[in-house]
């Protein structure tokens, strides 16, 4: 199991979303998911998120609303763009616009684990799950 953290999943397709959530569970990540861009932006503004997985439509909305993304802290959250099919133009566009990585459904467990492992900087602790966790972290 990998270290704990928080992942936000913004994937509209239910089968695609559930497949990723199952893999993130194996990674030991606390997971939450959104079904529209306003929920994504609200959660990014209100909760510490270690990694964001989103489909190409959500990613485009985030990229296109750059001032709001900057104010929400999204640019400090690694964003992995998920797609139903591999298209080199879409991949290059996502990466050039600031995506941390790009992954194609169906997901391979080892690929997701590797991406999650590289998305967490070694010098930063992942998001704490609760205030009790933060009290324990600061009392040690």
Image (tube, rainbow, N blue to C red):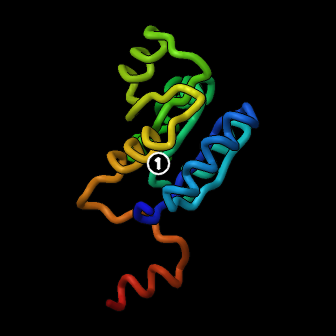
| Whole-percent x, y for residue 140 in the image | 32, 90
Q: In the image shown, does 67 or 127 lie closer to the viewer?
A: 127
For label 1, the crowd category at 10 Å Cα-Cα, with few meaning under 14, some 14 to 19 and many 20 or more, is many
Q: Position of residue 39 (x, y in %)?
A: 69, 45
Q: Which residue is mark 1?
A: 51
Q: Relative to 28, does residue 16 appear above or below in the rendering?
A: above
Residue 44 coordinates in the image, percent (x, y): 55, 50
- SS for callout 1: strand
Q: Quadrant of residue 83?
A: top right
Give me the residue at 35% from left, 52% from top.
Answer: 120
Q: Quadrant of the N terminus?
A: bottom left
- Can you name the residue that lies furthest to the left here? 123
Spot the residue most to the bottom.
139
- Judge whether 64 appears above or below 129 on screen: above
Q: What is the x, y in percent for residue 33? A: 67, 48
Q: Residue at x 38, y 35 (%)?
A: 100
Is 119 situated left or right of 58 in this image?
left
Q: Quadrant of residue 82?
A: top right
| Identity of the residue drawn at 63% across and 39% down | 10
- How many discs mark residues in the rendered view? 1
User: Which one is nearer the viewer's eye here, 94 or 118?
Assistant: 118
Residue 37 in view, yes or no: no
Q: Residue at x 49, y 26 (%)?
A: 63
Image side of residue 100 versus residue 13, left or right: left
The answer, for residue 90, to whether it is visible in the render is: yes
Q: Quadrant of residue 59?
A: top right
């Amino acid at each position: 199991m990998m270290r704990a953290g928080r992942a936000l999943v913004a994937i509209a397709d239910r089968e695609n979303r559930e497949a990723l959530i199952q893999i993130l569970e194996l990674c030991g990540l606390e997971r939450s998911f959104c079904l529209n861009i306003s929920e994504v932006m609200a959660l990014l503004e209100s909760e510490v998120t270690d990694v964001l997985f989103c489909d190409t439509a959500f990613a485009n909305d985030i990229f296109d609303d750059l001032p709001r993304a900057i104010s929400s802290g999204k640019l400090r959250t690694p964003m992995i763009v998920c797609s139903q099919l591999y298209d080199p133009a879409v991949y290059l566009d996502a990466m050039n616009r600031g995506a941390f990585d790009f992954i194609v459904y169906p997901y391979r467990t080892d690929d997701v684990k590797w991406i999650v492992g590289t998305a967490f900087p070694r010098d930063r602790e992942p998001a704490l799950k609760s205030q009790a966790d933060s009290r324990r972290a600061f009392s040690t």
